[in-house]
Amino acid sequence: MKVNEVLSLPVEDLVLGGQALAHHEGRVVFVDRGLPGDVVLARLHKVRSRFAEARLEAVETPSPDRVAAPCPHVTRCGGCRFQDLDYRVQCAVKERQVRETLIHLAGIPAPTVRPLVPAPEPFGYRNKMEFSFHPDPGGRAILGLHERGTFDRVFEIDDCLLPSRLTIEIVKLTQAHADAHRWPAYHPRLHDGQVRHLVVRHLPLTDQCAVHLVAAVEDLPGLETWAARIAALSPAVRTVSLLLNRARSNVASGERERVLVGDGVLVERLLDLEFEVRSGAFLQTNSRQAETLYQLALECAEIRSHETVLDLYCGSGTLTLLSARSACAAIGVESVEDALHSARRNSTRNGLVNTRFVAGEVRRVLREWARGERPEPARPEVVIVDPPRAGLHPRVVARTAELKPRRIVYVSCNPATLARDLKDFAALGYGLSEVTPVDMFPHTPHIECVARLDPVPPGRPE
């Protein structure tokens, strides 16, 4: 095999992360795009001693599980890449990937994997979308989505089936306004230009929408007119703002917010509690599946009225507050100050007086508690962890096990790091009782899981 060689390959499977798996002359070939059951023509772009990587050129024989992709941008966009795979098959693949990851990486011979919970709405489920500006060769500011696998190429969208219809109206109006006022788009390589991103958050459970224009300058021609036109699109639009971002990093956030319409705050309602949502707040982007995810976590925790719950990486306090309704006390630990401020406000908003929030990086807070360097709360009977994709630091695993909770609930967005951490917990006496995959992001390779860990009695094998 050599670079640029085109091969005819039967696709055998999808691996964790979304690449298609094939073999040629005894060597693994990972194909970017392609579905199980396809026979594809793929061009090699990387060849190593044990594997190769290729890009799809054409589908010679389609898989019987192929369906017509409804989005016109499916081959160009890096977003919902599996919409041409029957949704039931997507769910079956993800469930199997979780099971196989636990077997091979966690070393659990027969993990109890509950049936994956499919999304009730495979399209239109995203409550937040980020769109990018980029200059075309003539200098026009194009507002759209990144081309697959790039950070510096953007295409103008005709439609997107993931967000609400209002979101698409907002994008089209903003594109027209940028054209009329000749807003110069920021170039991520040259670091010049002004408008950078458009962020739209439309919460379906409360029908409240926030629109944020991210720019490198504070004053743009026609800015206030744009904000008024956006707000006039629908009563759902509660707030419109400018996020000032003068940094070179190409992120859709800002160092300062200038509110143009409203007060900058939305309210989300999850499992009968209300949560304020500001521009930089983390919130699960699939509202309806978020309720499912959190309900599963609470069921796994089996919180009793006399117990204390410790919620690590609590963010704006969603699981802390939901736990507090059943617990004697709930304590959240979070390193992001803005998130903690929101958590405390959310606690007050919902009238929950049995919550406490601790500022600090989780590993450091647990270490200081263990050493007596800061007042330690009551020993928790239940610990909930909801870490970022990188999972838990080994010292966090060790300190959590030292607390000797009755149960640990692990909410994961990465089956691979979940499996690694479960192996560490097993060495410290906590075994996996069950895990439930939840499809938060249909048509993508992402998988969320809720895992329940219980103490393993001495002498009982894992």
Image: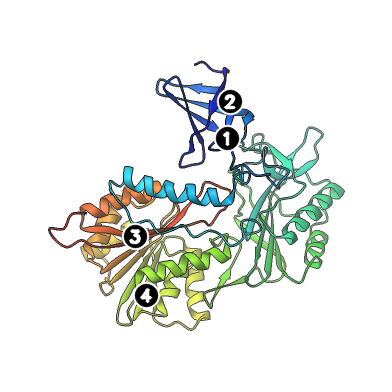
Looking at the image, residue 285 sits to the left or right of residue 15; the answer is right
- Which residue is tagged 4? 330
The answer to whether marks 1 and 2 mark residues whose Cβ atoms lie closer than 8 Å is yes
Instruction: Tell me where residue 123 appears, x and y as whole percent.
Output: 65, 56
Give the quadrant of residue 122: bottom right
- Which residue is tagged 2? 42
Instruction: Tell me where residue 373 appears, x and y as whole percent.
Output: 25, 65
Q: Which of pointers 3 and 4 lies earlier in the amino acid sequence?
A: 4
Q: Which of pointers 1 and 3 lies earlier in the amino acid sequence?
A: 1
Q: Which of pointers 3 and 2 lies earlier in the amino acid sequence?
A: 2
Q: Nearer the viewer, mark 4 or mark 1?
A: 1
Q: Nearer the viewer, residue 73 or 402?
A: 73
The reply to whether residue 54 is in sight is: yes
Name, please, the residue furthest toward the right: 180
Looking at the image, residue 271 sits to the left or right of residue 406; the answer is right
Which labelled disc corresponds to residue 434? 3
Callout 2: few (<14), some (14-19), or many (20+) C-alpha neighbours within 10 Å? many
Separation of residues labelled 4 and 1 (CA atoms): 46 Å
Q: Residue at x 51, y 41 (%)?
A: 18
Q: Nearer the viewer, residue 362 or 69?
A: 69
Callout 1: few (<14), some (14-19), or many (20+) C-alpha neighbours within 10 Å? many
